[in-house]
Amino acid sequence: MSKSRIEAFSDGVIAIIITIMVLEMKVPHGATFEALLPIIPVFLSYILSFVYLGIYWNNHHHLLHAAKSPTAAIMWANLHLLFWLSLIPFVTGWLGEHHDSALPMALYGFVLLCSAVAYFILQGFVISGHGEDSPLAKAVGSDWKGKSSVVCYAISIPMAFYSPAVSVAMYVLIAVLWLVPDRRMEAAFKRG
């Protein structure tokens, strides 16, 4: 299987995930600003999840672009990542409807945690195909963003049962952290 086929499949799955997510937002029953108020939490959870999916799509693109050739391990790790990402519309909708409840907030964090771990596994398989001294391995480095994100998700899940607001603030903070561009991978491509 070619690398471009995996990228095209993954792009299609992520596009479908985003489409499903937006279709979950129901049209208000009125034509006033007051009719929009009940869907604000749903819309905010959609924005947060859209940003996360955009981050994964962007990083996934760079990672697969760097891969030499797909292996069975890379293909299965990619499917593992897509599985967790495909659950984002469900937890997004539930979180939007029950934004101040602990269990939807914790489950949202659990899906984000599993997505991050799945990406970390995929990244490991791609790097192993290049070697630990490769430009890709050097660009990823210690992956402080990835490791700190996993730790924050792990903390935010039980935190949801004490303060859902703190959990959602942590999810937003992690998303903002990932929105800051990391130029190491692009620089490694130019060097390598």
Image: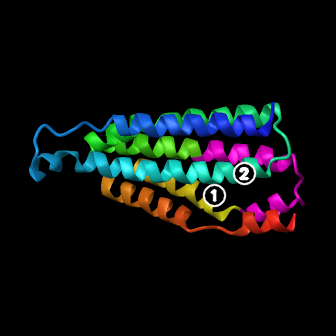
The residue under the point 79% across, 43% down is: 125
Left or right of residue 27, residue 82 in this image: right
Residue closer to the observer: 164 or 41: 41
Q: Amino acid at mark 2?
A: Leu
Left or right of residue 4, residue 163 in this image: left
Residue closer to the observer: 5 or 63: 5
Callout 2 crowding tier (Cα within 10 Å): few <14, some 14–19, many ≥20: some
How many numbered markers are drawn?
Answer: 2
Q: Amino acid at mark 1?
A: Lys
What type of secondary structure mainly makes up the magenta span?
A: helix
Percent x, y of residue 4: 75, 39
Residue closer to the observer: 87 or 165: 87
Element type where label 1 sits in the image: helix
> Which residue lies under the disc numbered 2?
63
- Residues shaded magenta: 116-142
Percent x, y of residue 42: 29, 45
Percent x, y of residue 38: 17, 46
Q: Which quarter of the image is occupied by the N terminus?
A: top right
In primary-sequence order, the first of circles 1 and 2 is 2
Q: Is residue 117 magenta?
A: yes
> Which residue lies under the disc numbered 1?
147
Can residue 154 be seen by looking at this rendering?
A: no
Can residue 174 be seen by looking at this rendering?
A: yes
Callout 1 crowding tier (Cα within 10 Å): few <14, some 14–19, many ≥20: few
Classify 5 as above or below 49: above
